[in-house]
Image (cartoon, rainbow, N blue to C red):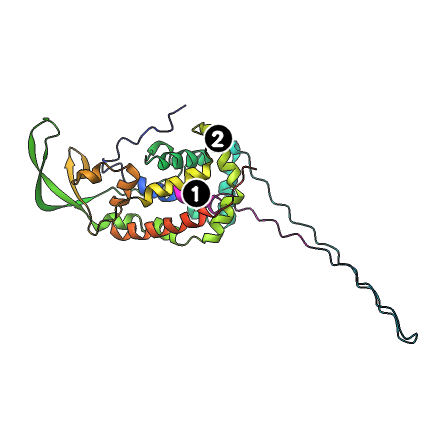
Amino acid sequence: MPNPEDRYTNEEDPSRVSPVLPFVVFVILAAIGLGYFFFWHERPSPDIDEIPVATPAPTPVPARPTPLPSATPTPQPQATPEPLPDLDSSDAPLRDKLNERGLADMLAYLTPEEVVRKTVRAVYNLSKGNVVQQYRPVQGPESVFTASATGATATIENPKKKGEKTETAVYRLNSKNSERYALFINLLRGLDRDVVVDLYQLYYPLLQQAYGELGEGPEEFHTVVLQALDSFLAAPRPADEPLLIRTSVHYQFLKPEYQALPATQKLMLRMGKQNRRVLHEELQSLRAALAQATVSES
């Protein structure tokens, strides 16, 4: 079995970073709003209380007609929720429900199989600050990460000769990166918080089952989800786009403190100031809502 903490070691490669951020957004969506993307079963209708039969009052005057007792209404049958599919066969119901609920566009982003397990494994890694390409449950955009040269240079440690210094060009993120993530940010902004929390609670048993298979600790998957959100929310929020340098084919942050951040927080820095602001607000709102959620393994 693969190590759940296998890292995506090529995160600095501009040709490979491109799919990761949308994956992050969809992981959060899939994990927190599982019912929104997965299955969309109907909730059972509330129980209908029987109305008691009214007792007629005594008849003081014989000529007055005796009122008839109130009829007891026939209770309506309670809606039976459609059971969750088995974890091993959950991919087909997932796609069927997306089609039924007018979310067929989402199908283009889902991986072919094991979406629930990949979601749980990915969220676990995100809770540790790791981004793992291998386990992402969705596909990302085809465009690549790009940066523009500023014309300035910086003196850095020579990556090929320890102890020596070298001059290197300085880069900055350009607007094309922000455009790559617009669809995913808009999808996140459009989520109904009440629907997300309600369906997350409803389908939590399937998530917990998949998490239990990892054998990664006693805590509930709910705790792992909150930790994953916290990892993103802890990212720095610089006023300007961070500067980058390039070593071989890899970009990295010029500031050592940014380069030392967990992969989740580096991704927040790479997505652009406006997207970073919106995503921070949305994830903060989701985190607050989920902190109040009541989850059960059964």
Check residue 212 in the rendering and tell me which mark sits there, or answer none: 2
Whether pointer 1 and pointer 2 mark residues with C-beta atoms closer than 8 Å, the reply is no
Q: Classify mark 1: residues with Cα within 10 Å, few (<14), some (14-19) or many (20+).
A: many
In percent of the image, x 21 and y 40: which residue is there?
Answer: 258
* The N terminus, quarter of image: top left
Q: Which region is colored magenta?
A: 27-48
- What's the CA distance linking mark 1 and mark 2? 18 Å
Q: Nearer the viewer, residue 149 or 239?
A: 239
Residue 22 percent location from the top left of the image:
34, 43
Q: Nearer the viewer, residue 203 or 179?
A: 203
Q: Secondary structure at mark 2?
A: helix
Q: Nearer the viewer, mark 1 or mark 2?
A: 2
Q: Secondary structure at mark 1?
A: helix
Residue 271 percent location from the top left of the image:
27, 46
Label 1: which residue?
30
Figure quadrant of residue 74: bottom right
In percent of the image, x 49 and y 43: which residue is there?
Answer: 38
Q: Is residue 92 visible?
A: yes
Residue 44 is covered by the magenta coloring = yes
Q: Is residue 19 visible?
A: no
Residue type at tag 2:
Gly
